[in-house]
Image (cartoon, grey):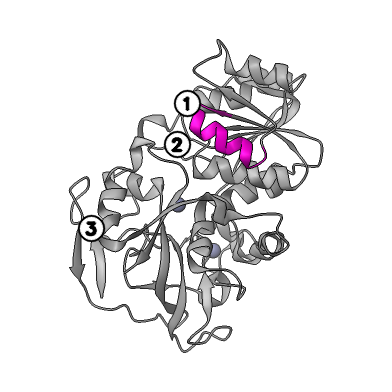
Amino acid sequence: MKAVVYESFSAPPQIKNVPDPTPETHGVVVKVMATGVCRSDWHGWVGHDPDIQLPHVPGHELAGIVEAVGKDVTQWKVGDRVTVPFVGGCGACPECHSGNHQVCDTQFQPGFTHWGSFAQYVGIHQADINLVALPETLDFATAASLGCRFVTSFRAVVDQGKTSAGQWVAVHGCGGVGLSAIMIANAIGANVVAIDISEEKLELARKLGAVATVNATRVANVAEAVVEITRGGAHVSLDALGHPTTCFNSISNLRKRGKHVQVGLMLADHSTPAIPMSKVIAHELEILGSHGMQAYRYDAMLAMMQSGKLAPDKLIGRTISLEQSIDALMNMDKFEGTGVTVITEF
Ligand SMILES: [Zn+2]
Ligand SMILES: [Zn+2]
C-alpha cells in the first residue's frame, strides 16, 4: 500500500510503498477513505511524542470501510463503514472496566503507538470496543473530522464541563478544537464567548454560534474582558489551543466554582504552565482534562448530528491528496487557514 512515512523526526516524510497491514486476531484492517491532518500529527513528527517509534506513519482521525477482520472479532464484518476515537482501549485494564477507555492503561493510538492512517489501509486493535459504525448519511470526510478534535470538544463541554443551558462558556483559541467546542456548547444552549487573535477565526466563531468574541490582541486583559462580558466570569472555560497564556486566561476568567477544561495539548516547553492556584482555592475552581472520547459515547454526538443540531462538516476547510498531506503536516504549526484539512485521495 501507499503510505506517508518518516524515518527521522522533523525530516520531510515521503510517500512509500509498504506492506499492507494484516488484522490482529482482535482487530480489523480499515481501508482509509478520509483522514484528518491534525496538530498532534505535527507534534509527533517533530518528536514531541515518546510513544512514536521510527519509521512511522502518522494519522489518527480516520474513517473508512472494514477490509479484513480478525478471527476473534464478533461485532464487525467486511464492508462496514466505520470510524474510531483517537484513543482505543484495551478492554482489560481497570480504566476500561470502569468505562473510561479514553484513559486506558495500554492505549492503542493509530498514528502514535502504531502506524496510522496517512495510508491506504490501517490496522485497528480491539475492534469490538473501539470501532464506531457510521450512519449511512454521514460522509467519510465529515466522519474523519470527528475523531480527535470534535469528540474531545464534545467530551470537554458535555461530559467533563457538564455545561448546561444558559451557562457562559469561554473558548480560548478558535482552531479546529475551539470551533467544535463553540458549535457544541451553542447547541446545548450555553452562551459562548470566543477568544482568538485572528478576526477571520472570530468571524467564523460568530457564524457557529458565539454570542460574543474577544480579540486578544485588542484588549489589555483577556480574562477581565471575559469577566465583564459574562457579568462575573464563565461557568466553563476551555483552553482549546494548548498554550501557557490561553491556559492561564482560561482559569483566570472563571466565575466562582467554575470549571476549566484543558483540551489543547501541552507538550515540550509548554508542559508545565503557570496556574493561578490561589484563585483555584479561593474560588473553588475545578481543573479538568479532556482526552478523546470512548467509542460508546459517539451515539449521543451522532444523534445530535443526525437531528441537525451539530454540523461538523462546516468545520472542514479543504480536502487534499495523500501527496499534498506531507506539506500540510510539516506546516501544521503555522496557524494558517481556518477549518480542518482532510485527506480524501489516496
Ligand atoms: Zn484499557
Ligand atoms: Zn487529531
Query: Circle 2: is it few (<14), some (14-19), or many (20+) Cα within 10 Å?
Result: some
Q: CA distance from mark 1 to mark 2?
A: 8 Å
Of residues 268 and 229, the one drawn nearer to the viewer in this rendering: 229
For the C terminus, give its image quadrant. bottom left
Residue 37 in the figure: left or right of residue 239: left
Amino acid type, residue under disc 3 in the picture: Leu
Q: Is residue 214 above or below residue 332?
A: above
Which dot marks residue 54? 3
Residue designated by label 2: 266
SS at mark 2 in the image: loop
- Position of residue 268 measured from the top left corner of the image (x, y, whole percent): 36, 35
Residue furthest top as drawn: 220
Amino acid type, residue under disc 1 in the picture: Pro
The magenta stretch spans residue 272: no
SS at mark 3 in the image: loop
- Position of residue 243 measured from the top left corner of the image (x, y, whole percent): 46, 30
Q: Name the residue at 74% across, 44% down.
A: 162
Of residues 301 and 142, the one drawn nearer to the viewer in this rendering: 142
Q: Name the residue at 56% across, 52% down.
A: 314
- Position of residue 111 measured from the top left corner of the image (x, y, whole percent): 37, 59
- Position of residue 108 measured from the top left corner of the image (x, y, whole percent): 45, 63
The magenta stretch spans residue 197: yes
Asked whether the beta carbons under mark 1 and mark 2 sit within 8 Å of each other, the answer is yes
User: Taking the image as drawn, is residue 273 in sight?
Assistant: no
Q: Which residues are magenta?
A: 195-209
Residue designated by label 1: 244
Residue 52 in the figure: left or right of residue 233: left
